[in-house]
Image: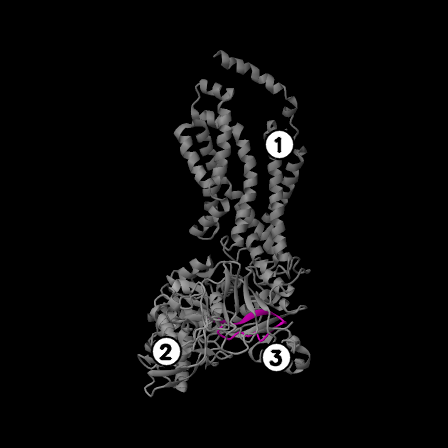
């Protein structure tokens, strides 16, 4: 008991030694975060307002106007079937962003819960969960998702399922590591000694302190999910045609890359900008949520 | 031949014959294409062909894919071959044949002095062995084509007698198929597998080197029986999967021929460069197959209605960039007995409405359309069909499977509608008609389960009647029956597209898809 209280007494003084780290700037002064939020908000707005903004029906074919260059009527030209590229780009954002954002929810929740259980209880529970994680980790993410979507059949629901089955492992690993560290800390020890049950300790005391890492990771995970959807669309395994989607737009445009290059470049740039925005948010959140990790 | 006695003098004369040659068998987007086809044939040089896929196997009796066939045809030759227009046969390793009065015995005379690239002379023993080998592998390979053959006899050193089970009109066309090409008796003592590692034949080229996934090289057979040929020293097929790269390679001179240009860039291939974008008449029919094991496609009205909904000229415009022709018949224009007046269903709003109203699903229905993934042309075709059918309240979901899974799904009849194509391998319609309309032939009528007693009867009669005009009449009737029953919606006839450097002379593709390189040469 003596040792315990000694450590206890020393802790606060160590924290006071780094006062600068505790002095948080307000979130709006965090440049990465603001830049990222602006980019992502614009993208989301464009997607949400696509039905208002898009000049044409994205799946309406007009073969007499196929493969036109940019013009007043079609700002980004038309594709092989005479569909307006700008309209398809806007509607494509709806599909890619929707799936990207929604697809992280299940892995986030499942991975976090399993990671917390593994880290908190340890023992055979930890061993079982982490060996399962290792199995999933042994395969490249894309390979596994493509294989799963192939088995499940193309379509939005199989994409959600495939991503959920594969990407929870990252959250699990991250949260487990954080929980193992937190478990040793005094406030947890205190809570447990105070007679709180495990669920309450995990949920109310450890949870809020470890979740920030998972949230930060979720930002880059959305980027990853969008990459997955675009890749699947490109390979013809994603959203079923004629629905507009950035990956299938790139695939459609590939044969014209030497003649009508912008048809492939425009959806490609949209993917890059979205990815950049989300990465900036992730970067900003790292600063905001875990200042003690900042050098 | 004096190699230096070339160009200048004979420019005029050969430019004319060159133009005539390319004019008869092909059309090019560059009218001045013949201007550089200068001089007498020159020996030497390596021909580089950039292609999308590597060959799979050199086994001519078991291999079905074109990227292999086009290569081993340069090594191993059959007794007969196809004329340039693809509609008839002419002797190659044979010199001629006689048919008995009962049409059941063919006596074939072999060409004397033909040697394999090993130096050994070809005799009737080699012919008997080769044809027997093919027949023996009927269940796994092309041997079904020899189903009417009862026996092959080596009657003399240069005479072969073929006895048939019954009269069989397509025999000579069958013997012109690459699977009946002549290889050395008993594979020169090797096993089948060993032999096809480095196959030996009598052809203009012999085995060189194969680095799988990268290139396959053949070198000239200097002892070729057609004296002075081939002109080329060697031919290399390079695997270049990306169509844009192939285009740039042939434009930049790294490759002489682009074997498979995309239609989308086909026109631009020949503009402002030394490449000629060539099309050759083909025997390719692209069609929409209806699986009659699935409802409601067993209903002839549904099939006829859908056939009448599809805008074929739109598909031709969007997918083939106007290079194809809307298809009206089961047979293709490049096939003997093609009937131009066959009443194949074209887009016809009134007919579509009438047939749909008379069908089991007058208010429309939901179904799926199966296509292989990664095929831009089929995806565009599918989306146009989806759009066309939607206007009649038929909701189509496009289902993409990777090419192997797509193939399996079709073979196992696990699809509703599917996009497919057929190209002929022999200059006789029987190969395709038997596959497409005879459900007992093993392919379940090209995987549609279409069964029409009348069509089957007409096809079997046409197989066994040797008289040309009788066969023509039977095939005309057959085409009419199939056009009415619409087991397939015929979509379009597509020509073969090639990007060819203007240095390459005499390069021609037959309607069956093969390109003999015996007469091809490269100007300097």
**In whole angstroms, how far apart are the C-alphas of marks 3 and 1?**
74 Å
Report the chain holding disc 2: B
Q: For residue B504: magenta?
A: yes
Say if mark 3 contacts mark 1, CB within 8 Å: no
Report the chain holding disc 1: A
Query: Which is more toward the observer, B441 or B420?
Result: B441
The tag on residue A181 is none
User: Residue A77, position in %: x, y?
Assistant: 64, 60
Look at the image and give the residue range highlighted in magenta. B490-512
**In whole angstroms, how far apart are the C-alphas of marks 2 and 1?**
78 Å
Above-or-below relation of B132 to B158: above
Q: Main secondary structure of the magenta part?
A: strand
User: Residue A36, position in %: x, y?
Assistant: 63, 40
The tag on residue B18 is 3
Instruction: Please identify, in this view, whether the residue under mark 3 or under mark 1 is nearer the observer.
Output: 3
Q: Say if residue B357 shows up in the picture.
A: no
Residue position marked by numbered label 2 in the rendering: B459
Say if mark 2 contacts mark 1, CB within 8 Å: no
Residue position marked by numbered label 1 in the rendering: A287
Circle 2: is it few (<14), some (14-19), or many (20+) Cα within 10 Å? many
Q: For residue B160: magenta?
A: no
Residue pushed farthest bottom? Answer: B101
Residue pushed farthest top? Answer: A2
Q: Quadrant of residue B406?
A: bottom left
From the image, which quarter does the C terminus of chain B lie in?
bottom right
């Amino acid at each position: 008991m003596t040792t315990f209280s000694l450590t206890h007494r020393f802790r606060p003084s160590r924290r006071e030694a780094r006062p600068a780290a505790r002095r948080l700037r307000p979130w709006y002064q965090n440049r990465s975060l603001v830049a990222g939020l602006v980019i992502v908000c614009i993208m989301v707005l464009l997607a949400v307002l696509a039905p208002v903004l898009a000049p044409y029906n994205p799946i309406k074919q007009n073969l007499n106007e196929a493969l036109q260059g940019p013009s007043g009527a079609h700002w980004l030209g038309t594709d092989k079937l005479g569909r307006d590229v700008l309209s398809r780009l806007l509607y494509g954002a709806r599909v890619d962003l929707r799936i990207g954002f929604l697809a992280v929810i299940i892995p986030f929740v499942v991975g976090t819960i399993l990671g917390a259980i593994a880290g908190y209880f340890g023992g055979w529970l930890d061993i079982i969960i982490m060996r399962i994680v290792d199995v999933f980790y042994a395969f490249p993410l894309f390979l596994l998702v493509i294989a799963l979507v192939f088995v499940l059949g193309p379509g939005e629901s199989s994409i959600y399922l495939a991503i959920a089955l594969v990407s929870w492992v990252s959250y699990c690993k991250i949260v487990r590591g954080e929980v193992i560290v937190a478990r040793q800390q005094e406030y947890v020890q205190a809570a447990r000694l105070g007679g709180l049950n495990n669920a309450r300790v995990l949920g109310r005391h450890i949870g809020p302190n470890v979740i920030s890492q998972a949230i930060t990771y979720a930002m880059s995970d959305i980027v990853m999910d969008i990459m997955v959807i675009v890749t699947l669309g490109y390979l013809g395994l994603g959203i079923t045609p004629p629905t507009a989607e950035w990956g299938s737009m790139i695939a459609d445009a590939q044969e014209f890359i030497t003649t009508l290059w912008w048809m492939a470049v425009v959806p490609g740039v949209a993917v890059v900008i979205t990815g950049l925005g989300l990465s900036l948010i992730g970067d900003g959140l790292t600063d905001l949520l875990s200042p003690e990790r900042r050098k | 031949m004096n190699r230096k006695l070339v160009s200048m003098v004979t420019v005029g004369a050969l430019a004319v014959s060159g133009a005539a040659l390319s004019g008869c068998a092909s059309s090019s987007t560059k009218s001045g294409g013949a201007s550089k086809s200068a001089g007498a044939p020159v020996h030497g040089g390596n021909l580089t062909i950039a292609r999308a896929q590597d060959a799979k196997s050199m086994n001519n009796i078991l291999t079905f894919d074109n990227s292999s066939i086009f290569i081993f045809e340069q090594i191993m030759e059959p007794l007969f071959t196809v004329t340039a227009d693809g509609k008839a046969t002419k002797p190659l390793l044979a010199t001629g044949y006689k048919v008995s009065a009962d049409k059941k015995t063919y006596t074939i005379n072999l060409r004397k002095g033909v040697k394999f690239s090993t130096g050994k002379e070809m005799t009737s023993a080699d012919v008997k062995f080769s044809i027997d080998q093919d027949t023996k592998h009927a269940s796994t390979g092309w041997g079904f084509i020899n189903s009417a053959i009862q026996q092959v006899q080596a009657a003399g050193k240069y005479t072969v007698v073929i006895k048939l089970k019954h009269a069989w009109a397509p025999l000579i066309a069958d013997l012109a198929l690459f699977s009946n090409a002549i290889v050395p008796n008993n594979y020169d003592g090797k096993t089948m597998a060993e032999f096809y590692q480095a196959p030996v034949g009598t052809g203009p080229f012999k085995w060189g080197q194969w680095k799988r996934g990268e290139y396959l090289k053949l070198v000239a057979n200097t002892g070729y029986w057609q004296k002075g040929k081939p002109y080329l020293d060697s031919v290399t097929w390079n695997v270049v999967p990306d169509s844009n790269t192939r285009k740039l390679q042939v434009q930049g001179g790294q490759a002489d021929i682009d074997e498979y240009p995309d239609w989308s860039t086909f026109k631009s291939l020949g503009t402002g460069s030394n490449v000629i974008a060539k099309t050759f008449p083909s025997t390719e029919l692209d069609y929409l197959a209806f699986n009659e094991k699935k409802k409601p496609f067993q209903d002839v009205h549904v099939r006829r209605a859908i056939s009448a909904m599809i805008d074929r000229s739109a598909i031709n415009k969007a997918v083939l960039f106007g290079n194809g022709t809307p298809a009206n018949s089961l047979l293709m224009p490049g096939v003997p007995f093609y009937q131009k007046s066959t009443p194949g269903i074209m887009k016809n709003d009134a007919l579509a409405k009438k047939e749909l109203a008379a069908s089991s699903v007058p208010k429309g229905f939901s179904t799926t359309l199966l296509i292989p993934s990664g095929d831009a042309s089929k995806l565009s075709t599918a989306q146009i069909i989806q759009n066309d059918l939607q206007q009649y309240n038929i909701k189509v979901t496009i289902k993409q499977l990777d090419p192997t899974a797509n193939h399996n799904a079709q073979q196992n009849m696990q699809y509703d509608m599917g996009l497919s194509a057929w190209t002929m391998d022999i200059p006789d319609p029987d190969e395709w008609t038997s596959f497409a309309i005879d459900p007992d032939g093993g392919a379940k009528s090209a995987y549609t389960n279409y069964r029409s007693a009348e069509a089957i009867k007409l096809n079997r009669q046409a197989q066994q009647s040797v008289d040309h005009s009788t066969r023509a009449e039977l095939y005309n009737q057959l085409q009419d029956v199939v056009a009415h029953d619409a087991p397939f919606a015929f979509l379009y006839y597509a020509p073969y597209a090639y990007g060819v450097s203007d240095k390459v002379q005499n390069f021609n593709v037959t309607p069956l898809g093969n390109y003999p390189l015996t007469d091809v040469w490269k100007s300097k």
